[in-house]
Amino acid sequence: MKVTFERVIPNEKSSFRTIHNNSPISEFKWEYHYHPEIELVCVISGSGTRHVGYHKSNYTNGDLVLIGSNIPHSGFGLNSIDPHEEIVLQFREEILQFPQQEIEAISIKNLLELSKYGIHFHHKVKKIILPKLKLMLEYEGYKRYLLLLEILFELSQCQDYELLNKEIMPYTIISKNKTRLENIFTYVEHHYDKEINIEEVAQLANLTLPAFCNFFKKATQITFTEFVNRYRINKACLLMAQDKSISECSYSCGFNNVTYFNRMFKKYTGKTPSEFIKNYSHNKVNIDLKAEKEVKATAVF
């Protein structure tokens, strides 16, 4: 897993960037990266993994997240399955020009301060904001800029959200330890389905075992064991979305005990594996029905 700096180039004749991703996930690199621009990500539907700062969890039925400047994060197509469609806005805070004492300016500034923790907005907020984000793909010039301000102001007035991190992750932690963290992440990526020897990973990082444990906890705010368990649970969620059985998911993701797997799954997702499968199936049916209605509506015209 790479840890990269992303250079963001604004759209032509615009002060910020608008992206519409609607291609097979195999065409994208969902790497852990950072950039000075603030980022608003709206996954229109589907499931995947959100990895923002220290936080890592799964989403279903789409997602809406605001990520602060230089906060490391992965692309939201991570662990998703086709079709994956998202709209992304990337902008620098300095382009937001308005009188400092105006209530709109104060509320948006407060929103951007909170974004340093990563803000996950609830589904009903996404439902309200999505039509405006779709207009972003059509507008140009000042209309697009004014729409950005409107979206940010609406989000600043919203109370239906949760902060993804308890503290802000300094991007310097990632940038200074880039190579070492890449080696550790890649090792877990290639060995999560089997027993992992922490002493072997410490040697890979050129650290003694106590030094490695201290380094990893300082860099990620979680222990290495917790990181591995979270990674495995995220992989298990992906397999469940592909109709694999609970026991198959457990053993395929490095858990040799289904009871322990069930306990870890509930700890990190808030649901039992059975509840997750039921909820995912329900959302999938709703998405399929919605798509069918849209096809029929299109056929009428």
Image (spheres, rainbow, N blue to C red):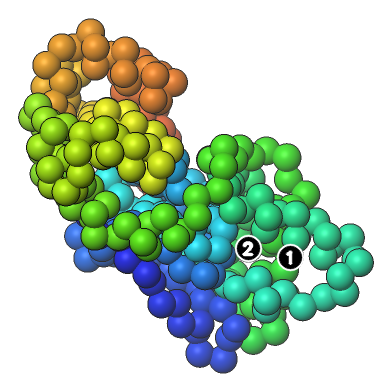
Query: Please, which residue is most extreme toward the top here?
Result: 259
Please report contact status of discs 2 and 1: CB closer than 8 Å, yes or no: yes
Q: Is residue 135 left or right of residue 86?
A: right
Q: Secondary structure at mark 2?
A: helix
Residue 132 numbered tag: 2
Q: Nearer the viewer, residue 146 or 211?
A: 211
Task: Estimate the x, y position of residue 130 in percent, counting from the top left.
Answer: 58, 56
The reply to whether residue 255 is visible in this rendering is yes
Q: Is residue 178 left or right of residue 161?
A: left
Name the residue: 27% across, 52% down.
Answer: 181
Q: Amino acid at mark 2?
A: Lys
Q: Which residue is mark 1?
A: 150
Mark 2 vs mark 1: give the one in front. 1
Query: Please, which residue is most extreme toward the bottom here?
Result: 13
Q: Is residue 27 left or right of residue 37?
A: left
Q: Is residue 131 above or below residue 191?
A: below
Q: Is residue 196 above or below residue 44?
A: above
Task: Estimate the x, y position of residue 271 in percent, counting from the top left.
Answer: 40, 19
The reply to whether residue 24 is visible in this rendering is no
Q: Is residue 34 left or right of residue 252?
A: right
* Alpha-carbon span between mark 2 and mark 1: 9 Å
Indicate the quadrant where residue 134 lies. bottom right
Name the residue: 11% across, 16% down.
Answer: 256
Task: Estimate the x, y position of residue 42 in percent, counting from the top left.
Answer: 50, 55
Q: Amino acid at mark 1?
A: Glu
| Number of residues whose C-alpha sits closer than 10 Å to that of mark 1, classed few (under 14), some (14–19) or many (20 or more) | some
Task: Estimate the x, y position of residue 101 in percent, counting from the top left.
Answer: 91, 67
Name the residue: 46% across, 82% down.
Answer: 9
Residue 200 numbered tag: none
Which is more N-terminal, label 1 or label 2?
2
Name the residue: 53% across, 40% down.
Answer: 164
